């Protein structure tokens, strides 16, 4: 059964403790909000750094792929030209037109 506070001093102590708890709670919420803001900035900075680094890697990869494609395209072209001009130099023109012609499939009646 509740019989009251018993004394004015007990009420003062309780009120002081409740006030201190409210202040601590407000202070803790402010600290947590500030820490969350710092974490958000750090996460954004990390994401930006990672995206820039990944873009840099992709640009290097694309540059290498472009160089490789040029080599792949240039080598057969050089071989075909060398073969073509060697036939012209030797006077053998028998395959110069057929060399570039694609054979057509034969129809079976």
Image (cartoon, rainbow, N blue to C red):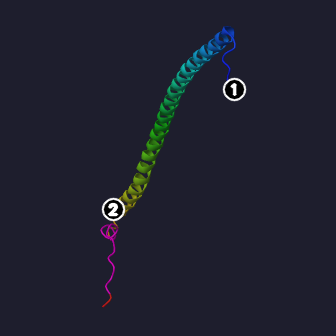
Measured as percent of width and height from the top left, residue 8 is found at 66, 9
Measured as percent of width and height from the top left, residue 87 is found at 36, 63
Magenta run includes residue 43: no
Q: Quadrant of residue 20?
A: top right
Residue for point 33% across, 65% down? 91
Q: Which stretch appears magenta?
A: 94-107
Measured as percent of width and height from the top left, residue 48 is found at 47, 31
In this rendered view, identify the residue nearer to me: 21 or 88. 21
Q: Which mark is residue 102?
A: none
Q: Which residue is mark 1?
A: 1
Q: Is residue 101 left or right of residue 24?
A: left
For the stretch drawn in magenta, the main secondary structure is loop
Q: Which residue is mark 2?
A: 88
Assess whether mark 2 and mark 1 are in contact (beta carbons under 8 angstroms): no
Magenta run includes residue 99: yes
In the displayed structure, would residue 72 be above or below residue 39?
below
Element at label 1: loop
Residue for point 42% across, 46% down? 66
Element at label 2: helix
Which of the two labelled residues, at mark 1 and mark 2, occupies the earlier sequence position? 1
């Amino acid at each position: 059964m509740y019989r009251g506070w018993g004394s004015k001093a007990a009420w003062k102590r309780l009120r002081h403790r409740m006030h201190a708890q409210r202040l601590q709670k407000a202070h803790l919420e402010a600290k947590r909000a500030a820490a969350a803001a710092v974490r958000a900035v750090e996460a954004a900075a990390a994401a930006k750094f990672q995206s820039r680094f990944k873009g840099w890697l992709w640009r290097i990869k694309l540059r290498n792929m472009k160089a490789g494609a040029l080599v792949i395209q240039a080598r057969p072209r050089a071989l075909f030209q060398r073969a073509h001009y060697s036939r012209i130099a030797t006077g053998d023109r028998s395959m110069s037109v057929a060399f570039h012609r694609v054979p057509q499939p034969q129809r079976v009646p």
